[in-house]
Image (cartoon, rainbow, N blue to C red):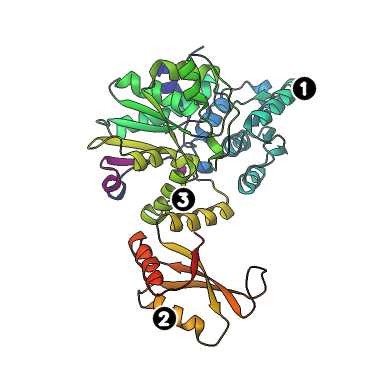
């Protein structure tokens, strides 16, 4: 079984008013930062917050009445779960979702709110998937695979049709890869219309399953590491997606968490867009490597579902990585005016003190002294470096914590 351009056209015809045609927006900011002409495909604006609804809705619409009556089951770290749950609610059919035990609480809650029966099982997608397969065999419910299904791939491929319509002279498209469903659909759609468009898949450096599979020429299962990009943390690509990717993809590249965090921060600050880690992977690679100077490039921002606690961490880490938040610990004599002298030196450089924490009782703090931790807000790394140099020149005893 494979997926054709006609399959993608058929999928488009069936999406009705449920699926949105998401905007493609030129970004002057990211164009300047990358040296390319960047057009953001804002798939995080899709209903349920990601591209996953496209495939889930088309697959469920294609079921027979008998299959719908029995219901569906799926495994997902979050976005596919919400897509399947929402699509099932529209068709008014029973739905069970198996999610990893460490899935984002926000995604678990959203999935339940769409009416699905949520089962938390396994440490990652692959373990959850085995559980979903078992439930499917035991109950007769239809398994809605997250990526290795022709209906799923065809519907995701509609994004490729939209890109060609919105930017006919596009040069390159960067697509995040988990199991490969999104990339496969876009490859078939765009390569069928214009084989000269370069399409690059982007994986987390902690889960390079598709890249390793292509390098060896066969499906590979990896152990995987840790990444904040849970949406692309897949150990084994799909067999169908692997064949499509092997045939059409131009290149697969890797991106790490630090690059993703910086990009998420920039998206929030510059574009006012909240994009989840997996969704930011393509743009993260572009900003970190500047691979396509002068070309018209489309990174697909494929999801925006992120836990609020993680979002707070992203902001804090982003500020630190950009040199705009500095945390230092100063040791002072415990006497009146000692802290004021240091504060005056910091203020002389127009650095903002965000937080002050005193410590007199820790074992590393000598009697008669006090440890003071300061969270400082700076304009950029240049001002942060100037602050550190100034404190050294004033013989202030301190240690940089971040």
Tell me the magenta residue range: 31-45
Quarter occupied by residue 333:
bottom right
Residue shown at 65% from the left, 44% from the top: 108
- Name the residue tied to disc 2: 344
The label nearer to you, 1 versus 3, is 3
In the shown orientation, is residue 299 left or right of residue 213? left
Say if residue 21 shows up in the picture.
Answer: no
- Name the residue tied to disc 3: 274
Judging depth in this view, the residue of 122 and 258 nearest the camera is 258
Residue shown at 62% from the left, 45% from the top: 104
Q: Is residue 346 above or below residue 169?
A: below
Is 35 contained in the magenta span? yes
Q: Residues within 10 Å of mark 2 (few under 14, many from 20)?
A: few
Q: Earlier in the sequence, mark 3 or mark 2?
A: 3
Q: Position of residue 100 (x, y in %)?
A: 67, 37
The label nearer to you, 3 versus 2, is 2
């Amino acid at each position: 079984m494979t997926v054709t351009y006609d399959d993608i056209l058929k999928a488009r015809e069936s999406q009705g008013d449920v699926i949105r045609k998401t905007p493609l927006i030129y970004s002057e900011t990211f164009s300047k930062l990358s040296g390319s002409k960047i057009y953001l495909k804002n798939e995080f604006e899709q209903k349920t917050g990601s591209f996953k609804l496209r495939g889930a809705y088309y697959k469920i619409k294609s079921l027979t009445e008998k299959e719908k009556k029995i219901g569906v089951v799926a495994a997902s770290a979050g976005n596919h779960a919400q897509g399947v749950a929402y699509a099932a609610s529209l068709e008014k059919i029973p739905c069970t979702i198996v999610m990893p035990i460490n899935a984002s609480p926000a995604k678990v809650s959203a999935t339940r709110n769409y009416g699905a029966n949520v089962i938390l099982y396994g440490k990652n997608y692959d373990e959850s998937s085995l559980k979903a397969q078992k439930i499917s065999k035991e109950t007769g419910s239809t398994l809605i695979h997250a990526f290795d299904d022709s209906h799923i791939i065809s519907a995701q491929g509609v994004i490729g049709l939209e890109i060609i319509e919105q930017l006919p002279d596009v040069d390159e498209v960067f697509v995040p890869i988990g199991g490969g469903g999104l990339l496969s659909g876009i490859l078939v759609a765009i390569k069928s219309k214009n084989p000269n468009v370069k399409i690059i898949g982007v994986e987390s450096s902690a889960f390079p399953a598709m890249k390793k599979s292509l390098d060896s020429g066969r499906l590979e299962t990896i152990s995987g590491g840790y990444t904040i990009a849970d949406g692309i943390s897949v150990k084994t690509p799909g067999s169908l997606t692997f064949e499509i990717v092997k045939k059409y993809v131009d290149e697969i590249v890797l991106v790490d968490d630090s690059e993703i965090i910086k990009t998420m921060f920039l998206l929030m600050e510059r574009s006012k867009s909240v994009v989840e880690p997996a969704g930011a992977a393509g743009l993260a690679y572009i900003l970190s490597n500047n691979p396509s100077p002068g070309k018209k490039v489309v990174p697909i921002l494929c999801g925006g579902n992120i836990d609020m606690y993680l979002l707070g961490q992203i902001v804090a880490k982003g500020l630190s990585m950009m040199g705009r938040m500095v945390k230092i610990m100063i040791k002072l004599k415990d006497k009146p005016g000692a802290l004021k002298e240091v504060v005056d030196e910091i203020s002389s450089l127009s650095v903002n003190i965000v937080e002050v924490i005193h410590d007199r009782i820790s074992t590393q703090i000598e009697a008669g002294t006090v440890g003071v931790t300061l969270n400082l807000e700076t304009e950029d790394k240049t001002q942060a470096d100037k602050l550190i140099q100034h404190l050294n020149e004033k013989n202030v005893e301190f240690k940089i914590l971040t």
